[in-house]
Image (cartoon, coloured by chain):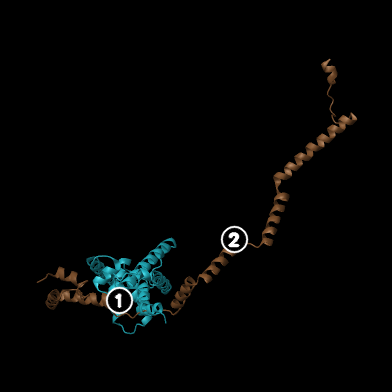
Chain colours: A cyan, B brown
């Protein structure tokens, strides 16, 4: 096993996970993962150790994923009607989350449907914070934004998730 | 003591993200202990907007991805292989074998010569012109026939 393969084994999991959660599709996540590692392979010599290696990979991943997200969004616009995604609307989350009977795939689908409701910038912050467990400082470095921006994007994203659940709850009651 | 508004703002981000200083964190927890409304909100945020993500398992990654990456790297690493692929593409796009090129040129030539309507028209005009010339020369040689019409007075008489 060469050094690059070792690097792939160590980091492909989180590269794929971030791409998958941002884009919501396995084939898009695979495309991003391939592009990221080809980019890492080609630019390894340029890595200057100014930031942590993982930060560098996260940065390439988020940039590649956001670019593909924008490309897909343009394609969707051209190919109306808009695909609502994995599921239409939110179910009352509390019931669903409490239920242990949900299969893994269903949970994953629910997760993607939640993320899908968020604008991509908030979504990336939620993915890096709550799924990848990065600190504000690290997220700020990955995305090249201020820590306060990270905080406000997370805050707005979470408010949106809760407000969507409220709306859904009201609709269900009606 | 912080007010509910400020506490709520912290609940949506720094408190649940464990990004508060120990003192500030203690203040929030003291407030939550005495404020049922903020406590309920904190619980709601955790249940609906944080736990679903933090408790999620990582998606499984396909083994094909590494194979594809390896293949692309091999292609980039091997100049001979890359050259061969590129030259094959170039050949298939631009280089035709001479026999096919000649055959194509011959077919095009025939089509242009035979089917060209302009040329056909030109041929017709030329034929007609030549026919007239032959008749005229015949009439000069034999002294009859070309001018069928009665011109009235002969030319000599006219000038005299």
Residue A11 image offset from top left, x and y in percent: 36, 77
Which chain is home to disc 2?
B
Residue, far bottom: A101
Q: Is residue A73 left or right of residue B152?
A: left
**Which residue is located at x 28 percent, y 78 percent?**
B54
Q: Residues within 10 Å of mark 2 (few under 14, many from 20)?
A: few
> In the figure, residue B100 lies in which quadrant?
bottom right
User: In the picture, which quadrant includes the C terminus of chain B?
Assistant: top right
**Which residue is located at x 59 percent, y 61 percent?**
B94
Which label belongs to residue B94? Answer: 2
Whether residue B7 is visible = yes
- Which residue is under mark 1? A132
Q: Is residue B36 left or right of residue B85?
A: left
> In the figure, residue B69 lies in which quadrant?
bottom left
SS of the residue under disc 2: helix
**Which residue is located at x 30 percent, y 76 percent?**
A132
Question: Mark 2, mark 1: which one is toward the viewer?
Answer: 2
Q: Nearer the viewer, residue A143 or A37?
A: A37
Q: Residues within 10 Å of mark 1 (few under 14, many from 20)?
A: some
Mark 2 to mark 1: distance in Å? 50 Å
Residue A137 image offset from top left, x and y in percent: 24, 71
Whether residue A167 is visible = no
Q: Nearer the viewer, residue A5 or A67?
A: A5
Q: Nearer the viewer, residue A167 or A152?
A: A152
Which label belongs to residue B1? Answer: none
Residue A54 image offset from top left, x and y in percent: 32, 74
SS of the residue under disc 1: loop
Q: Is residue B68 left or right of residue B59?
A: right
Q: Determine whether B118 is above or below A119 in the image.
A: above
User: In the picture, which quadrant includes the N terminus of chain B?
Assistant: bottom left
> In the figure, residue A48 lies in which quadrant?
bottom left
Residue, far right: B142
């Amino acid at each position: 096993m060469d050094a690059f393969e070792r690097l792939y084994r160590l980091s492909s999991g989180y590269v794929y996970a971030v791409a998958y959660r941002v884009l919501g599709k396995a084939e898009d996540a695979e495309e991003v993962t391939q592009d990221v590692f080809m980019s890492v392979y080609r630019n390894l010599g340029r890595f200057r150790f100014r930031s942590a290696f993982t930060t560098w990979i996260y940065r390439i991943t988020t940039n590649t994923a956001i670019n593909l997200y924008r490309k897909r969004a343009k394609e969707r616009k051209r190919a109306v009607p808009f695909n609502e995604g994995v599921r239409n609307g939110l179910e009352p989350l509390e019931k669903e989350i409490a239920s242990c009977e949900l299969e893994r795939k269903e949970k994953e689908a629910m997760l993607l449907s939640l993320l899908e409701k968020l604008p991509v910038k908030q979504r990336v912050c939620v993915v890096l914070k709550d799924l990848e467990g990065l600190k504000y400082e690290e997220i700020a470095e990955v995305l090249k934004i201020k820590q306060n921006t990270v905080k406000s994007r997370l805050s707005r994203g979470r408010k949106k998730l809760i407000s969507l659940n409220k709306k859904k709850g009201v609709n269900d009651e009606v | 003591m912080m007010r509910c508004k400020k506490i709520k703002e912290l609940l949506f981000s720094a408190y649940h993200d464990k990004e508060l200083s120990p003192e500030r964190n203690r203040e929030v927890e003291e407030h939550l202990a005495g404020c049922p409304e903020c406590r309920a909100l904190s619980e709601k945020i955790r249940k609906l907007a944080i736990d679903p993500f933090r408790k999620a398992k990582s998606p499984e990654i396909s083994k094909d991805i590494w194979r594809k990456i390896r293949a692309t790297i091999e292609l980039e690493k091997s100049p001979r292989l890359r050259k061969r692929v590129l030259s094959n593409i170039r050949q298939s796009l631009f280089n035709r074998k001479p026999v096919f090129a000649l055959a194509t040129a011959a077919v095009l030539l025939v089509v242009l010569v035979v089917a060209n309507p302009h040329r056909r028209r030109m041929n017709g005009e030329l034929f007609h012109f030549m026919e007239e010339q032959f008749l005229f020369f015949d009439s000069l040689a034999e002294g009859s026939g070309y001018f069928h019409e009665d011109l009235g007075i002969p030319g000599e008489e006219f000038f005299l």
